[in-house]
DNA sequence: ATAGGGTTAG
């Protein structure tokens, strides 16, 4: 699956339709649900012996009593009673015990029950064997499950289905997919259950070839009208990136439910198609299906990728009105949404309100702080996380190292890199990239280079790219060229490094080399992604590209920028023309520079917002160096807080300086 | 006895 960009430009024509999507729509609120307390009382072996049942009576034939014993978690006690001859066991007792273990995910106890069963006179019972296979799969005991399967003298369709479902649920999609033809080969006819599981596996593998085959098979077997199969098909197609097929299946479904909607919504959210998600969120309710935790989670995630604060807040309010509890899974996406929409304060509020925080909650919070340039706070929160006893994972470290790099916290960075070993986390390439970045940003270019040479794993393009970026920052042409060559060997089609190299040459006044890089890009078909910026004003999105005159107020916007530009020039702004190299004639350089998309967006925002209010601009690629300087001046001259979200982070401009400390 | 949907990084 392709990685999603950090931010996606919206489609103003469609997004604006959904800017106020809910105010005039009837809403569907679900009744407030109180979750029934689950029975987690299947005790540990030690406490089982303690016998919550008191002294066992020797004449137990009372089935109600047995049922209660099993349900109250005295499973081993029951086995004990069987051993002592106090109970005459039957299939249903084993069955209940196995089911209980599966429900409570008790692998150890499950093994004990299994063992007991194998010595009983019912050991040949196919029904219970299937149940045990399922139990092992539910408890994650894959080896046990496989052994049970292999040793079964006869199997039925349920056996195979339980195997396939188990693989699919345990992230072993290849095995699930491979087992399906075997099952069919031995002559069993798959049913709804089998299809749902195989489709889940096909989706996880992002394998539309398998998915389509299974889809055809479903139709032949008349399973295509099943809700489970339908939802699984929607999920499979969207995971394969085939949105139209997914939508088609969804529309053809005779019976839908929340899961079907959620599958479709999640599909669009995964692709970063935020507008579609918002539309579906509304449509779902129009058709009287209530949103669930899954729906909210996907929708917040979509808002995060668009960075639409108003929308996100609205749906958050919707969730509260709907009486949904703030569980970690949803809370985590909320934290992420608020952070990515530019309101780190709200993200912190959500984080504080969570009553159970998992690694992801912490990671989302740390990431948010890091993206907002709060390097020290990221580190401080990381320490709190350790104190709280939450075990950091690879993502945690990536985020913390990244924060150190951007915050110029060299020593901390080194320390945390070492700390990874203590937590038994093997650094991946990404961690090395961040370390190179850390050293490079601190100006230790040679150290960064030797760090790469000493890496125990093969450096990839991103590692050399990090060095290249630092060379651009410190104008080291020789090392920069070397790094660029390594990047081009490993990944010749990324426009980013080409632009960086071009910038290095331009800063050195080597225009011939700039032209060579430009030719390289042209010949190699390497295209720079067109830059665009957008602002949310009065419930509408306004999008700009460089030299844009498509906006109805483009004349006014240009005049506004010219006015602002002369003001900031008075206080020291000098345009840096090395930032416009590509597709621009030299004499036009400064002129073009002045109409970069972020400058147009800023000018527009200045025109249309009240003095003193915060301006929030979003951009689909890195903010340009000259614009960064210009915006700093504007924040001072116009006395505005300006927040720009670009590909990697937020820039909080205030009184002439930026939270990124000019490192980005 | 067997089935479908959700989060964090770069």
Image (cartoon, helix red, strand yellow):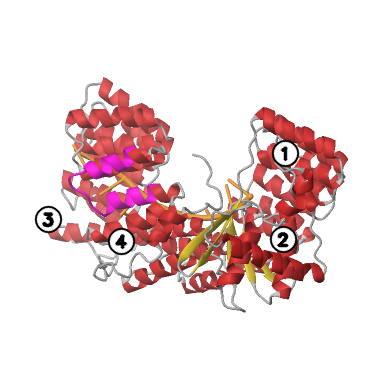
Q: Main secondary structure of the magenta part?
A: helix
Precedes in sequence: disc 1 or disc 4: 4
* Disc 1 with disc 2 on a shared chain: yes
Residue with the mark numbered 3 = A61
Q: Residue furthest front?
A: A555
Residue at coordinates 65% horizontally, 65% vertically from top-left?
Answer: A559
How far apart marks 4 and 3 lie (CA) works out to 47 Å
* Disc 3 with disc 1 on a shared chain: yes
Of all chains, the one bearing label 2 is: A
Q: Is residue A180 left or right of residue A123?
A: right
Precedes in sequence: disc 3 or disc 2: 3
For label 3, the SS is: loop
Residue at coordinates 20% horizontally, 27% vertically from top-left?
Answer: A189
Kindly report which numbered mark, 4 or 3, lies closer to the viewer in this rendering.
Answer: 4
Residue with the mark numbered 2 = A628
Q: Is residue A460 left or right of residue A136?
A: right
Q: Nearer the viewer, residue A49 or A4?
A: A4
For label 4, the SS is: loop
Residue with the mark numbered 1 = A498
- In the image, the segment drawn in magenta is A245-267
A96 is higher (above) or lower (below) than A23: above
How far apart marks 1 and 2 lie (CA) works out to 21 Å
Of all chains, the one bearing label 3 is: A
């Amino acid at each position: 699956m392709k990685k999603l960009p950090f931010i996606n430009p919206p489609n103003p024509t469609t997004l604006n339709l959904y800017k106020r999507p809910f105010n005039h729509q009837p809403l569907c609120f679900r009744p407030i649900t109180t979750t029934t307390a689950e029975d987690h009382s299947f005790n540990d072996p030690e406490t089982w012996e303690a016998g919550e049942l008191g002294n066992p009576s020797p004449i137990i034939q009372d089935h109600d009593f047995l049922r209660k014993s099993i349900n109250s978690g005295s499973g081993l006690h029951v086995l004990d009673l069987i051993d002592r001859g106090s109970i005459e066991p039957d299939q249903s007792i084993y069955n209940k015990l196995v089911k209980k273990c599966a429900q409570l995910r008790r692998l150890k106890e499950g093994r004990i029950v299994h063992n007991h069963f194998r010595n009983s006179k019912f050991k040949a019972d196919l029904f219970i064997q299937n149940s045990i296979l399922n139990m092992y799969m539910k408890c994650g005991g894959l080896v046990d499950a496989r052994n049970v399967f292999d040793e079964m003298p006869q199997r039925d369709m349920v056996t195979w289905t339980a195997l396939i479902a188990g693989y699919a649920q345990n992230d072993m999609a290849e095995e699930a997919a491979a087992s399906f033809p075997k099952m069919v080969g031995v002559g069993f006819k798959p049913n709804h259950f089998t299809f749902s599981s195989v489709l889940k596996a096909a989706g996880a593998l992002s394998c539309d070839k398998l998915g389509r085959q299974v889809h055809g098979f479903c139709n032949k077997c008349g399973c295509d009208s099943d809700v489970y199969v339908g939802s699984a098909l929607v999920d499979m197609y969207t995971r394969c990136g085939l949105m139209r097929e997914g939508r088609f299946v969804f529309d053809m479904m005779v019976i839908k439910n929340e899961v079907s909607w959620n599958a479709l919504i999640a599909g669009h959210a995964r692709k970063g198609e935020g507008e579609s998600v918002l539309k579906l969120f509304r449509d779902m309710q129009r058709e009287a299906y209530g949103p669930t935790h899954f729906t909210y989670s996907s929708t917040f995630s979509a808002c995060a990728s668009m960075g639409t604060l108003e929308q996100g807040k609205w749906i958050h309010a919707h969730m509260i009105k709907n009486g949904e509890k703030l569980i970690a899974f949803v809370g985590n996406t909320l934290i992420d949404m608020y952070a990515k929409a530019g309101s780190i304060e709200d993200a912190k509020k959500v984080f504080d309100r969570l009553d159970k925080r998992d690694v992801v909650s912490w990671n989302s919070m740390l990431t948010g702080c890091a993206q907002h340039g709060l390097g020290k706070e990221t580190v401080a929160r990381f320490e709190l996380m350790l104190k709280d006893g939450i075990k950091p994972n690879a993502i945690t470290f990536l985020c913390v190292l990244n924060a150190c790099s951007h915050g110029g916290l060299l020593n901390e960075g080194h320390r945390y890199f070492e700390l990874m070993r203590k937590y038994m986390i093997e650094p991946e390439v990404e961690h090395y990239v961040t370390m190179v970045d850390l050293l490079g940003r601190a100006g230790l270019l040679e150290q960064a280079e030797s760090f790469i040479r000493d890496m125990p794993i093969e450096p990839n393009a991103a590692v050399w790219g990090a060095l290249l970026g630092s060379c651009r920052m410190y104008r080291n042409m020789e090392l920069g060229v070397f790094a660029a060559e390594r990047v081009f060997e490993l990944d010749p089609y990324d426009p980013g490094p080409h632009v960086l190299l071009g910038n290095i040459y331009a800063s050195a006044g080597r225009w011939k080399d700039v032209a060579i890089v430009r030719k390289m890009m042209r010949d190699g078909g390497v295209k720079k992604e067109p830059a665009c910026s957008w602002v949310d004003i009065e419930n509408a999105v306004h999008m700009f590209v460089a030299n844009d005159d498509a906006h109805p107020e483009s004349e006014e916007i240009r005049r506004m920028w010219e006015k602002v530009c002369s003001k900031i020039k008075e206080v020291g702004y000098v345009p840096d023309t090395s930032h416009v190299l590509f597709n621009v004639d030299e004499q036009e350089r400064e002129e073009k520079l002045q109409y970069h998309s972020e400058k147009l967006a800023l000018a527009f925002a200045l025109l249309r917002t009240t003095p003193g209010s915060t301006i929030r601009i979003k951009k689909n690629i890195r903010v340009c160096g000259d614009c960064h300087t210009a915006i700093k001046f504007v924040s001072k001259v116009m006395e505005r807080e300006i927040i720009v979200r670009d590909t990697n982070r937020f820039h909080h401009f205030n009184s002439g300086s930026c939270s990124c400390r000019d490192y980005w």
